[in-house]
Image (cartoon, rainbow, N blue to C red):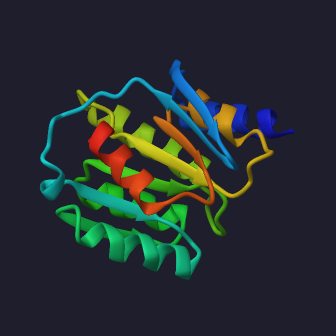
Amino acid sequence: MVHEKLTALLEEIGIETKKKIYWEESIESIQIVKTHPNKTNTKIENVRVLLVEDQPSNRKTLEVYLKHKVGKVDIAENGKQAVEKFSENEYDIILMDLQMPIMGGIEASLRIKKIEQDRKVKRSIPIIAFTANYYSDDKDISVEIGMDVYLSKPFQCKTIYELIQEYA
């Protein structure tokens, strides 16, 4: 059923993407899956981040941590807001929760990829997906649709920081 929904979304939006995993690791209860980074070598203190997270405590923790590390952090509380913010602003990286109300991270990421396709961008914005739903199809779907990193919760803020350095 999940793959049928994904197929329908892909057809509706009209994009094709499949990234290759180059690194996968499970550390205790955390799982990290990475595709090859396409860095711009932007200095970390200049990186513009779109943080998409519906849980207020998680959002605030990441926001406070990142504001001392990167150039700019914009917040979206759901995928719909993320797509709107992406349409209006430029970012170097997106941190995307997958399970959210109104519009989840998978659909939001597909819509962002479509916007990029329409704009004919040279470099697709890296999207780091994260979720507490460790045992779902989210990992495979995230990579299939073109997200760059899949990270299971709970994770440490420094892990996100290291991923931003690697991908931005």
Give 75 or 4, whichever is nearer the viewer: 75
Residue at 12% across, 47% down: 43
Residue at 64% across, 65% down: 100
Residue at 70% across, 37% down: 6
> Eyeballing the image, is 101 above or below 93?
below
Measuring from the top left, give residue 23's x and y in whole percent: 52, 24
The answer to whether residue 111 is left or right of residue 90 is: right
> Eyeballing the image, is 22 above or below 68?
above
Picture quadrant of residue 74: bottom left
Please identify the quadrant where the C terminus is shown: top left
Give 97 or 83, whichever is nearer the viewer: 97
Measuring from the top left, give residue 32's x and y in whole percent: 57, 39
Give 158 or 37, whichever is nearer the viewer: 158
Residue at 34% across, 38% down: 116
The answer to whether residue 144 is left or right of residue 5 is: left
Measuring from the top left, give residue 123's x and y in whole percent: 26, 30
In the image, farthest residue toward the front: 28
Picture quadrant of residue 104: bottom right
> Eyeballing the image, is 122 above or below 59?
above
The answer to whether residue 33 is left or right of residue 121 is: right
Give 154 or 92, whichever is nearer the viewer: 154
Please identify the quadrant where the N terminus is shown: top right
